[in-house]
Image: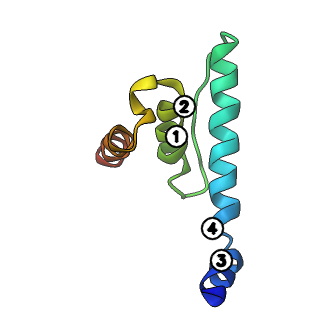
Amino acid sequence: MNSFLSGIEGSGWLRHVKAIMETAFFVANAIHMGISVVIHCSDGWDRTSQTCCKLITCQHFHFTSPSNHMTSISHCVAHS
């Protein structure tokens, strides 16, 4: 188990997830303050769809249950 956790830590995956969460929170905050936003990632990764998907789950009460959360992920994947 320790080597598995070390592998995850060494991969940088948790930093990536943290960046997605921080960006979604930042955008949600801006929307809440009435600021228009455009989300676009230009470095070749799929962070645009990941951020938008996380934003949907943060903004809409329907997606707070695990099964409904999976619905939003499926929707985002299908449309990215």
Is 68 rendered above or below residue 10? above
**Mark 4 residue type:** Trp
- Disc 2 to disc 1, how far (Cα)? 6 Å
Q: Which residue is mark 3?
A: 11
For label 4, count other residues whose C-alpha is less than 10 Å away and answer few (under 14), some (14-19) or many (20+).
Answer: few
Q: Which mark is residue 58?
A: 2
- Disc 2 to disc 3, how far (Cα)? 26 Å
Q: Are marks 3 and 4 in contact (CB under 8 Å)?
A: yes
Residue at image position (45%, 24%) is 61
Disc 3, SS = helix
Q: Which residue is mark 4?
A: 13
Q: Residue furthest bottom?
A: 3
In this orientation, which residue lies closer to the viewer: 6 or 21? 6
Mark 4 or mark 1, which has the lower sequence index?
A: 4
Q: Which mark is residue 54?
A: 1
- Disc 1 to disc 3, how far (Cα)? 21 Å
Location of residue 27 in the rendering, given as x and y in whole percent from the top left corner: 65, 29
